[in-house]
């Protein structure tokens, strides 16, 4: 396989060795697994040598229907929204508009993290928000049914109706422990809004999505009609459709990205190129490498990180109501994949598909 090397442009990467022939059987494996696990639809993108070598849709957008999933079908990314949003925040750091280690209350305008005994000596910072070490509560968000009243971010922060989650508060010393917090990423969303003076979807479109060619993607919640027409329907376990087809997530940075597997693959490639020091990458190499370096074991700034050497990966999983996503990229080899399904699936389907891809395309774990 070709490694992702500094100075080797996308054209050069495209001229490297083709994918292994054993990848030809991957479609059959995926279809068989979908049938076994009753997965209505799946969107897939595979990265090899720093380029998308396979982009496919499988199944249908809604169980019992006939409209096929295509590479253009939009899925909710769930928590994979977080690493994409984290790159947007890091671009503000690079522009000198945010600090990784300053108290976020110094930059927040619309709302402030309430001070208490835990914040007297240690403060909530952007580095801690992105690495889930800020001591903030609220693990995740269920979203809001289409047609239901939706809260403002300020109501979400304080747990006031119509918010359906508890108040977001610091309940242990910032920096001491790692605990996953969608609440922390929602604070980051407000931080970006306050610093830029722009709606979060507009900022992310101009700062991350469009520069990476992620033109199908949007943080808009709810989606405008033209984009909503391209969406898959979410399904609960047992393949029961989500009423209204999907939920709406005002907690955009934590859970609100609508996207395709191919667009998320472009994001992975963008991070790989930045890590490699490719000219024109979205972030400087030192910043990109920082994001995929553990702050606390297993998690960097927006990414889950694992392995070492050629086996080192940056990844993230995601779940919204009726949708599951898995994204993985290799730091050094220019490989990776994105799998998106319109089902909350709890029996290991995503892992099985990911391992089938890794075996087919010679990921480092499968090369001896």
Image: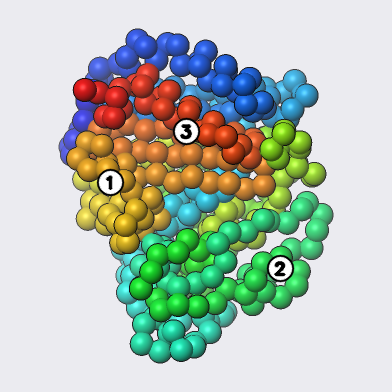
- Judge from the rendering whether residue 25 lies leftward or rightward of residue 60; answer left or right: left
Instruction: Return the disc, 1 or 2, that comes first in the chain's sequence.
Output: 2
Say if mark 1 contacts mark 3, CB within 8 Å.
Answer: no
Q: Is residue 129 above or below residue 344?
A: below
Separation (CA) of disc 1 from disc 3: 27 Å
Separation (CA) of disc 1 from disc 2: 38 Å
User: Of the numbered discs in the image, which one, if any, rests on residue 10?
Assistant: none
Q: Which residue is label 3 attached to?
A: 351
Q: Is residue 332 above or below residue 22?
A: below
Residue 325's spot in the image, x, y percent? 53, 40
Q: Residue at x 76, y 36 (%)?
A: 240
**Picture quadrant of residue 42:** top right
Q: Viewer-proximal residue, 115 or 306?
A: 306
Label 2 crowd bin: few (<14), some (14–19), many (20+), radius 10 Å: many
Q: Is residue 290 above or below residue 364?
A: below
Eye-nearest disc, 1 or 3: 3
User: Which element carries disc 3, helix, strand or loop?
Assistant: helix
Label 1 crowd bin: few (<14), some (14–19), many (20+), radius 10 Å: many
Taking the image as drawn, is residue 70 in sight? no
Q: Is residue 109 above or below residue 96?
A: below
Q: Which residue is label 2 attached to?
A: 163
Q: Residue at x 22, y 55 (%)?
A: 286
Q: Viewer-proximal residue, 255 or 200?
A: 255
Q: Which residue is label 1 attached to?
A: 274
Instruction: Return the disc, 2 or 3, that comes first in the chain's sequence.
Output: 2
- Judge from the rendering whether residue 239 lies leftward or rightward of residue 268; answer left or right: right
Eye-nearest disc, 1 or 2: 2
Taking the image as drawn, is residue 139 in sight? yes
Instruction: Return the disc, 1 or 3, that comes first in the chain's sequence.
Output: 1
């Amino acid at each position: 396989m070709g490694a992702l090397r500094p100075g080797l442009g996308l054209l050069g990467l495209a001229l490297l060795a083709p994918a292994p022939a054993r990848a030809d059987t991957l479609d059959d494996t995926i279809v068989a697994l979908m049938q076994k696990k009753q997965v209505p639809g799946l969107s897939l993108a595979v990265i090899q040598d720093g380029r998308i070598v396979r982009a496919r849709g499988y199944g249908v957008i809604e169980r019992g229907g006939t409209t096929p999933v295509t590479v253009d079908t939009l899925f909710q990314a769930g928590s994979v929204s977080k690493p994409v949003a984290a790159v947007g925040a890091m671009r503000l750091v690079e522009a000198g508009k945010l600090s990784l280690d300053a108290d976020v209350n110094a930059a927040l305008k619309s709302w402030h993290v309430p001070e208490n005994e835990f914040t007297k000596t240690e403060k909530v910072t952007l580095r801690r928000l992105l690495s889930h070490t800020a001591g903030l509560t609220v693990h995740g968000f269920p979203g809001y049914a289409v047609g239901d009243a939706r809260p403002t971010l300020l109501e979400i922060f304080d747990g006031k109706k119509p918010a359906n989650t508890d108040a977001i508060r610091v309940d242990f010393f910032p920096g001491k422990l790692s605990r996953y917090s969608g609440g922390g990423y929602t604070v980051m969303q407000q931080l970006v809004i306050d610093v830029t003076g722009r709606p979060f979807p507009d900022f992310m479109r101009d700062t991350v999505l469009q520069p990476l060619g992620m033109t199908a993607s949007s943080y808009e919640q709810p989606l405008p009609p033209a984009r909503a027409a391209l969406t898959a329907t979410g399904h609960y376990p047992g393949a029961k459709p989500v009423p209204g087809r999907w939920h709406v997530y005002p907690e955009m940075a934590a859970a609100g990205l609508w996207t395709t597997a191919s667009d998320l693959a472009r994001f992975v490639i963008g991070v790989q190129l930045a890590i490699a020091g490719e000219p024109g990458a979205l972030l400087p190499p030192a910043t990109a490498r920082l994001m995929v370096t553990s702050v606390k074991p297993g998690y960097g700034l927006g990414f889950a990180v694992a392995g070492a050497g050629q086996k080192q990966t940056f990844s993230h999983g995601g779940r919204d109501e009726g949708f599951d996503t898995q994204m993985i990229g290799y730091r050094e080899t220019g490989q990776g994949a994105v799998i998106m399904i319109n089902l909350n699936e709890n029996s290991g389907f995503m892992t099985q598909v990911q391992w089938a891809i890794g075996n087919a395309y010679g990921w480092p774990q499968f090369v001896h």
